[in-house]
Amino acid sequence: MDRPNTGADVDQEEAVRRALEKYYRDGKPPWDTGVTPPELVALVEGRVEGREEGHGALPPGRALELGCGTGTNAIYLARHGWEVVAVDLVDRAIEQAREKADAAGVAARLLHGDATRLDELDAPGPYDLFFDLSCYCGIPPHRRDAYAAGLTRRAAPGARLLMFGYGPGTLDDEFSGVTADELRARFDGWELVDVTPGTNPFPTFWFTLRAGEA
């Protein structure tokens, strides 16, 4: 059960929300490149160097994207046969994502809401794939257990979570960042099957987790 929020917790959540909204007011956020990461492409399409294309590709199923921004990756998944639900905290981002999905002619359910409060949204699951491009690593610590629990309740047996995050100390605050040890501790019933360093000039990582078989 989540502990009651303190005043400091609420202030921290509001500070994160305001910071994200400012990125979208000021222009394109640095994480919203408009290009689907090759790590997601490799997982979905089985594109790995030295391996025949398509070998090991995930069969399309149901996907939930956490922190979807303007919808680049939700649209990519929908185009590859996935039934997609995507969530973002910033209403401006979701408005743009809906416009882009309409223009692309794809069906994706794009929801304005909090990735740590999925029970408040129409996103019941189960899902076969979760995708997180630097969402979790910016969540205040007091909401991270709720994030993990929300995904766990919605995970189909053997579901994958592909997460990109930056390391602790990368940003000028006291809480941003994520480590492999933290994910092992918070995601009870999941296995951390891969950790691959990113190519950024500061510490970043791609984490792949797999939910247990029921």
Image (spheres, rainbow, N blue to C red):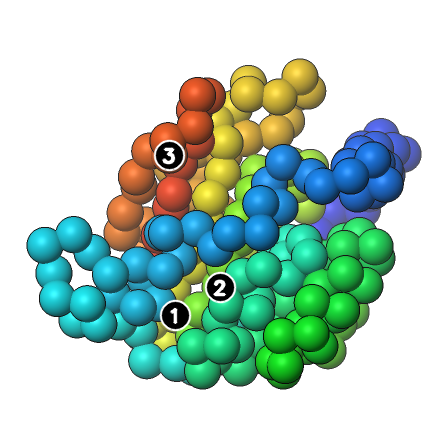
> Which residue was labeled with disc 1?
159
* 144 to 146, vertically: above or below: above
Q: Secondary structure at mark 3?
A: loop
Say whether disc 2 or disc 1 marks the residue closer to the N-terminus.
2
Residue 108 visible, this orientation? yes
Asked whether the residues under the numbered discs 2 and 1 touch, taking CB atoms below 8 Å apart as contact, a structural biologist would say: yes
| Residue 147: image location, x then y, percent | 61, 54
Q: State left or right for residue 51 relative to residue 132.
A: left
Identify the image quadrant of the N terminus: bottom right
> Which residue was labeled with disc 3?
198
Label 2 CA crowd tier, 10 Å (few <14, some 14–19, many 20+)? many
The amino acid type of the residue labelled 1 equals Ala
Task: Between label 2 and label 1, give the one nearer the viewer.
Answer: 2
Q: State left or right for residue 200 relative to residue 139.
A: left
The amino acid type of the residue labelled 3 equals Gly
Say whether disc 2 or disc 3 marks the residue closer to the N-terminus.
2
The residues bearing labels 1 and 3 have C-alpha atoms spaced at a distance of 23 Å
Query: Residue at 62% across / 75% down in the picture?
Result: 104
Quarter location, residue 84 = bottom right
Residue found farthest to the front: 103
> Which residue was labeled with disc 2?
130
The amino acid type of the residue labelled 2 equals Phe
